[in-house]
Amino acid sequence: MEAPRIATIIRAIYRAVTELHWSVLAGGVLLHMALAWMLMALAGESGLLEPSAFLYWYLTTASTVGYGDLSPVTQPGRLLTAFIVFPGAIAAFTTVVAKALAGMSGRWRRRRMGLADYRGEREHIVLVGYEEQRTPRMIDELVADAEPDQDLILLARRDLVNEDDRIRYVRARSLTAREDLLRAGIPTAARVIIFASNDEETLAAALAITAMNRGGHIVCFFQEEENARLLTAHCPNVEVVLAPSVELVVKAVKDPGSSHLLHILASHTDAAATLFSVTWPGKDAPFGAVTSHFLRHGAVPVSWRPAGGARSDFRFDTKGTISSGDRIFYVADRRLPADALAV
């Protein structure tokens, strides 16, 4: 074997020993157990040699519980236990406990500081970007309407100490860094919300994320309409939300109170009812019959969109026909499960 190869092996062994890897610790514990068993055999401690009895005695000794129902009975056995078994077993036990606690504490610190890895998550929500005034509010809204056991992951460039148990935090070098996007579980996310500090960062993040996530629903917030149009031209399946538009301002002037109503319909925390949507699971039916079905469940349909239709293709035709797969938008005090609507 070549000298450089031997030196590499020696360095690896030295590193494992000095850092007390689990493999080294396990080997040390097994070696000490074997030594203790041989010493008890040499001392004539026949009552401790049976495997289950020896394991029970060794573990109760190591943990300092010491029930006393099994113990050395010969003078050599007691001396060997006092000077060899006790120190080694107790040292092994305390080392294992300390290393396990240190590992759990390290993982907890990594999660709080945004260094954890969530690429194994499935069907979760990822909130990309952090804006000090709006992001906490968005988290409240997302959590209020989250599905059971659906995790919410926050991917942000800024340093945060995550004290919120409702979210998982990932600290990113940039919102386009592939490794950071993978750690946030972007490829397998069911929904992604991109709300960066400016439109340029939002646009760059959207392009990087759409290249990785092909099946999830992606929503972006923009201040300027031109940036929104640019993204839509390249990623037509991304849903874009613009800052309060001219149309909404005029609507509030022409119809006083309409802006408050729109806010209520969009919020899951400030109102007794809000706007939801569901894919119609039933057979083809007139809109009137579907409306009656929703009303029996305490919900009011307001519009519908044909399956495969354009994002802006909303129908308000009360004489139209709802087909399986169409998306219905309704107002209710809670989200209705699709199976409850099947007829």
Image (cartoon, rainbow, N blue to C red):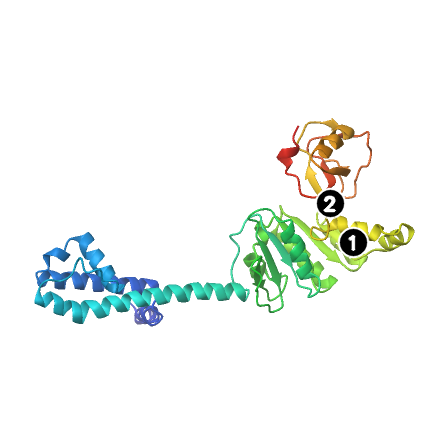
User: Do the numbered discs 2 and 1 sit on residues whose CB atoms are within 8 Å?
Assistant: no
| Element assignment for label 2 | strand
Q: Is residue 47 visible?
A: yes
Horizontally, residue 163 falls left or right of residue 271, namely: left
Q: Nearer the viewer, residue 244 or 140?
A: 140
Horizontally, residue 177 falls left or right of residue 255, namely: left
Who comes first in sequence, dot 2 or dot 1? Answer: 1
Q: Nearer the viewer, residue 199 or 168?
A: 168
Q: Residue 18, which numbered label?
A: none
Tell me where residue 129 appears, x and y as whole percent. Answer: 66, 62
Amino acid on which the number 2 mark rests in the picture: Leu
Residue drawn at x 17%, y 63% is 36
Tell me where residue 91 appears, x and y as whole percent. Answer: 27, 69
Residue holding disc 2: 275
Horizontally, residue 299 falls left or right of residue 154, namely: right
Tell me where residue 109 appears, x and y as whole percent. Answer: 49, 66
Image quadrant occupied by the N terminus: bottom left
* Farthest right residue in view: 254
Amino acid on which the number 1 mark rests in the picture: Arg
Residue holding disc 1: 229
Q: Against 319, is 39 above or below? A: below
Badge 1: few (under 14), some or many (20 or more) residues near its Cα, within 10 Å?
A: some
Q: Against 196, is 256 above or below? A: above
Residue drawn at x 64%, y 57% is 127
Q: Nearer the viewer, residue 79 or 193?
A: 79
Tell me where residue 116 appears, x and y as whole percent. Answer: 51, 61
